[in-house]
Every structure is written in C-alpha cells, then in structure tokens.
Image: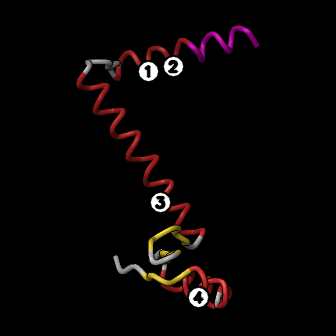
Amino acid sequence: MRESIISLTQFKSEASQQINALKESSEPLILTQNGHASAVVEDYTQYQKRQKSLAMLRLMVQGETDIQHEHLTSQKDVFKNIRERLKAENNDG
C-alpha cells in the first residue's frame, strides 16, 4: 500500500484535486501539521470497505473466542430452536 503524505496547508489549497485523486487511487492521504502526521483522509467507498472488513475480523475473533471457551451450539440444536420458534409463531398468529 503506497501512502501519499502532504501538509495540511497543501491539502487546503488543493482540496478538490486531492479528493478527486483519492477516488482514483483508493489509497489514503496522510496530512501533516508542523511536520508530524495529524490526520488521514480517504475515499468514502474505501472507508466503507475498511469498516466492513473490520466488522468481519471482529466476528472472526469472537468466534475463535467462543470456540476456546467452548461456547458452542450444535447445528442440530440450532435448527431445533429455529423450528420451535417458527412453530410458536405460527400457533400465536
């Protein structure tokens, strides 16, 4: 992943062009202030993809944790519970 680094001052003076470049490259833009990294700007589509990826990773970690702590439900029990819920809904309605 190649990162572009520019100053906040440069970004402000070229904001429109920089945002267009973000859409084309899909790489984040690191903004510096007083010579130090201070912010990251990225295309919204890339942001959404990153958020979805993080959510999937969190689910995977939770699944691994559940396995380690033996918090498991068999497939048979899952389908049994679903059938019972559906049957109860049909009887109520």
User: CB atoms at circles 4 and 3 under 8 Å apart?
Assistant: no
- In magenta stretch: residue 25: no
Q: Which mark is on residue 82?
A: 2
Q: CA distance from mark 4 to mark 2?
A: 58 Å
Which residue position holds label 1?
79
Give above or below for 45 relative to 56: below
Q: Residue furthest left?
A: 68
Q: CA distance from mark 1 to mark 4?
A: 59 Å
Q: Which mark is on residue 50?
A: 3
Label 1 or label 4, whichever lies nearer to me, is: 4
Secondary structure at numbered mark 1: helix
Q: Residue at x 23, y 24 (%)?
A: 68
User: CB atoms at circles 2 and 1 under 8 Å apart?
Assistant: yes
The magenta stretch spans which residues? 85-93
Q: CA distance from mark 3 to mark 1?
A: 33 Å
Give above or below for 64 relative to 49: above
Give above or below for 81 relative to 1: above
Q: CA distance from mark 4 to mark 3?
A: 26 Å
Q: Position of residue 64 (x, y in %)?
A: 28, 33
Whichever of labels 1 and 4 marks the residue nearer the N terminus, that label is 4
Which quarter shows the C terminus?
Answer: top right
Secondary structure at numbered mark 3: helix
Whichever of labels 3 and 2 marks the residue nearer the N terminus, that label is 3
- In magenta stretch: residue 88: yes
Check disc 3 and give the amino acid type. Answer: Arg
Q: Position of residue 44 (x, y in %)?
A: 60, 68
Q: Which mark is on residue 10?
A: 4
